[in-house]
Amino acid sequence: MPAWLDISIFGLVQFFMLIGLLGLVVPIFPGLVVMWLAALGYGLAKGFDTLGIVIFILITLFMVGGSVADNLLMGAGAHQGGASWWTIIVALIAGIAGTILFPPFGGIIAAPVSVLLLEYLRLRDWQKAWLAFRGLVAGFGLSYFVRLFIGVALMVLWWIWVWNG
């Protein structure tokens, strides 16, 4: 493969890896999936040798784990704060709808506000609703750092693949 093509493939994949990593700031944006797709594109363009297969499997496992952990940590934080599971499900739906209708920050606003209002309607107690709200926000904060750590791990794994492939 000509050097210009190798450099172009590397640059394009690195660009999408960075887009995915920066996209992790937005809770509904599938940054880890974008990074996974970039790694898949790299593998399809350059080929999957043994190292590439092993690293791509690791990237896949990290991506799936990070995607699941994200929702679990936010939901668990809200539940620990006292929110009902129905409130958490509605807040997740509100977050997705908010992101689609008012990108990129609609979901970041819609999910916590939904928890606060629904818990107030359920309990008629602002203090308890506020605790559920704070739990969701704390879960979001923790999930952000988990997603960021996993995103950096995906990029490092891909770099190992590039430099040893």
Image (cartoon, rainbow, N blue to C red):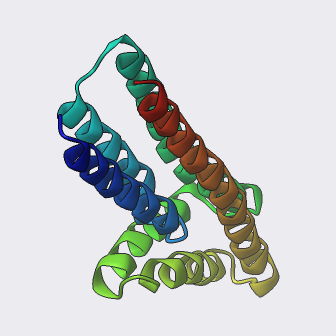
Up the image or down, 46 lies above or below 66; here it is above
**47 with respect to 139 (left or right):** left
Indicate whether 165 appears above or below 107: above
- Of residue 121 and residue 161, the one placed in the foreground of this image is 161
Q: Among all residues in the image, which is located at the extreme top?
A: 50
Total labels: the figure holds 0
Measured as percent of width and height from the top left, residue 124 is found at 69, 83
Residue positioned 41% across, 74% down in the render: 94
Q: Residue furthest front?
A: 3
Q: Position of residue 49 (x, y in %)?
A: 31, 15
- Front residue (pair 147, 35): 35
Question: Dividing the image into 4 quarters, which one contains the C terminus?
Answer: top left
37 left or right of 28? left
- Closer to us: 34 or 112: 34
Q: Residue at x 26, y 48 (%)?
A: 9
Residue 77 vertical placement versus 125 (above, below): above
Regarding residue 30, the answer to whether it shows in the image is: no
Q: Is residue 117 above or below residue 148?
A: below
Residue drawn at (65%, 48%) of the image? 149
Which residue is at the front of the view, 52 or 70?
A: 52
Snapshot quadrant of residue 143: bottom right
Q: Position of residue 126 (x, y in %)?
A: 76, 86
Residue, x 40% and y 54% (percent of image)? Answer: 14
Residue 118 visible in image: yes
Quadrant that contains the N terminus: top left
x and y percent of residue 25 in the render? Answer: 55, 70
